[in-house]
Image (cartoon, rainbow, N blue to C red):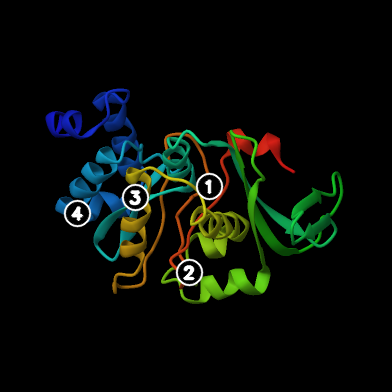
Amino acid sequence: MTGEFRNALPSHIKPEKFQRVVMTVVQQNQGLMNADRKSLLASCLKCAADGLIPDGREAALVMFGQQVQYMPMLAGIQKRIRNSGEIASIQAHVIYENDHFVWHQGVDASIEHRPLFPGDRGKAIGAYAVAKFKDGSDPQFEVMDVAAIEKVRAVSRAGKSGPWVQWWDEMARKTVFRRLSKWLPMDTEAEDLMRRDDENDAQDVAAPTIRVEAEAPSKLDALERDDDGVVLEETRELEGSAA
């Protein structure tokens, strides 16, 4: 399928690189090896058309029954959002009970977060996401407590399995960032990308078994949505600019 991938991929992604990642992921996941081949190849083409790599960071190939579904991750959607040219940085973090966290609303809205380090940060009590703009305008942020995050989890078709069970903190970041993304400037491709992901998550399919192993070890960054049409996580390269 080299020709098909070459036609679908943007010029800066070589089809050989894309194919190597796909082969590595499929060979490391017996479920994908035995999955419906037509849905696997179709998912790869959709991923290529969006200019993302299914490496478990930008995007992933996820099993739902015997069908394969391409799922964009936070890093991939953030990359699309940054294409608007208006976003300077994006970050999302989990808040723990022993952290120092102050959230002010109103005209001079702000967030102050000082994680406890080193030491036991305690249990998670919420999460937040922040976007800074290149024009210097006030940052946009979203804060959710654990109850709000769990409400999103409760309506997720993967709420009792996969990343919600194994990596709750990752899914909390994804969820609050997705809610923030509704207020961010995006190009048409980014809007289409998230709309497709919302539609995929709303499909009535069998309970999924999500297991993706990337070329380099990484946590599964599968996206989630809530009842308002929301999803996601943080980009490690931006995490150094945490509040």
Amino acid type of the residue tagged 3 in the rendering = Leu
Q: Which residue is mark 2?
A: 226
Of mark 4 and mark 1, the one earlier in the sequence is 4
Of circles 4 and 2, the one toward us is 2
State the CA–CA distance, disc 4 to disc 2: 25 Å
Q: Residues within 10 Å of mark 4 (few under 14, many from 20)?
A: some
Which residue type does callout 1 highlight?
A: Lys
Sequence-earlier tag: 3 or 4: 4
Q: Element under label 4?
A: helix
Q: Quadrant of residue 229?
A: bottom left
In depth, the one of 135 and 145 nearer the eye is 135
Q: Earlier in the sequence, mark 4 or mark 2?
A: 4
For the point 19% across and 28% down, the residue is 6
Who is closer to the viewer here, 29 or 185? 185
Tag 2: Cα neighbours inside 10 Å, few (<14), some, or many (≥20)?
many
Give the Cα separation between the discs numbered 2 and 3.
16 Å
Tag 2 secondary structure: loop
| Residue pointed to by mark 4 | 39
